[in-house]
Image: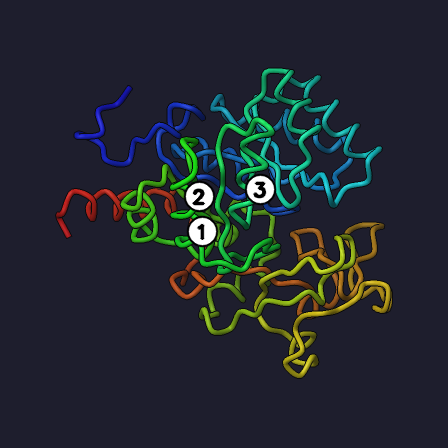
Amino acid sequence: MTDRRKDPLHTPLCDLLGCDQPVLLAGMGGVSRWELAAAVANAGGYGILGMVREDPTLIAAEVAALRGATDRPFAVNLIPSATAPGLLDAQIACCLDLGVPAFSFFWDVMPDVVARVKRAGCLVLHQVGTVEAARIAEEAGADAIIAQGVEAGGHVHGRLPAFGLAEQILARTDLPVVVSGGIATGEGLAAALAIGADGVQCGTAFLATEESFAHPYHKSRIIEATSDDTVLTDVFVLNWPKGAAVRVIANSVTDGLDGHYLGHDPDNLPRVAIARDGDQPRLRFSTDSPLRTTIGDLEAMALYAGQGVGALNDVPPAAARLGDMVAQARNILKGTV
C-alpha cells in the first residue's frame, strides 16, 4: 500500500478498486464506452462502462474491447429501476458470465440486485442522492457509496449539494465515499479528500475528451458553456421513471418551458422522432444525448452537463484531463500552491 504521507492522493478506495488515482469515470450511458473507460483506466483512474438499457450483445463487445485496450480493473454501470426486468436480468447474467469484476448502480436501490452480484463475488459501487439511500445501499451490501449532488450533469437523484451530502454520509458510514457533482478540476478533488472522502467521480470533465463517445456538437456546447447555462429539468424523461430530473445545457426545448422546468408527465409528452442512431429513432423529450453516431436535430436533444462545466475550455485526451486534475490536487494537498 502506498504511504499517503508520500502520496496524499492514494486512498483506501484505490486499494479497493485497484486504481492509482481516486478519480472515477462516471458510467454515462452511451458516452462512457470502452475507448473512454480504457483511457481513464490506463491513466491511473477507474473506468466504468455506461451500459444502461444496452443489449447484452453490445455489453459483451464493449467488455471485450475494453479488455483488449487495458488490463486495469473496471466496472459496468447499470440502472436497475430504469431497465425492464427481463433485460436487466440478461444484462447481469451477461456481465457475470464475462467475469466483470464490479458493478456501478444508480437510482433506486434494489437490494436483490445488489445481493445477486455480491454472491458472485463482485464489488458494488452505488451512487445515491440522499442519506437514506446511502443507508439502504450499505445495508444491501455496497462496497462504496458515490454521493451525487444536485450540481451533477445527467440524471440527478437528490437535491443536496455534493459536499453537503457527502459530509452527512461520511458521518454515518465507514465505507469509502466518493463525491460526484460539478467536479472538473484538481481543486474539487483536493476538497473532496480534505473532508475525508476517498475520491471523486467525474462525468462532464470526461465527456469533453477525445475518447468520449459523445457527439462533437455536445462537446462543443460544453466547452462554450458556463455553470449558469445549465438547468435542472424533468422534461427529458422518456425512457426513465416519471420525475427523473436531469441537468442539461439550456437549449430550445428548455427555453420553451418558460421556467417551468419540473413536473412533466411522460404520458403527456408527444413521441416525435427528431434524430436517429442508425435505425433507432431518437425522440424529442427522451433521455438520449447525441452520440458520435447520431444524426438529426442535435440541438434539441438532452445536452448533459454539470455545474463544473465552466472550468472546461478544451477537448483533450482523457489522460491529459486526468493528469492535470491529479497534479493540481497533489500540489494543493502538499501546500505548494
Which quarter of the image is occupied by the N terminus?
A: top left
Q: Which residue is mark 1?
A: 165
Total numbered labels: 3
Local packing at callout 1 (Cα closer than 10 Å; few below 14, some 14-19, many 20+) is many
In the rendered view, does 19 fall on the left or right side of 25?
A: left
Residue 250: x and y in percent read 59, 73
Secondary structure of the residue carrying tag 3 is: loop
Q: How far apart are the two marked residues, 3 and 2, measured between alpha carbons?
A: 21 Å
The image quadrant of residue 53 is: top right
Classify residue 244 by image quadrant.
bottom right
Residue at the spot of label 3: 27
Q: Amino acid at mark 2?
A: Ile
What label does residue 89 carry, if any? none
Residue farthest left in this picture = 336
Q: Amino acid at mark 1?
A: Leu
- What kind of element bears circle 2? helix
- Left or right relative to 61: residue 320: left
Q: CA distance from mark 1 to mark 2?
A: 6 Å
* Label 1 residue SS: helix
Mark toward the viewer: 3 or 2: 2
- Where 51 sits versus 75, above or below? below
On screen, 124 above or below 303? above
Q: Residue at x 48, y 50 (%)?
A: 209
Q: Nearer the viewer, residue 283 or 198?
A: 198
- Contact (Cβ within 8 Å) of mark 3 with mark 2: no
Callouts 1 and 2 close, C-beta under 8 Å: yes
The residue indicated by pointer 2 is 169
Residue at position x 33%, y 42% in the image: 323
The residue under the point 73% across, 33% down is: 58
Front disc: 3 or 1:
1
Q: Is residue 337 above or below residue 60?
A: below
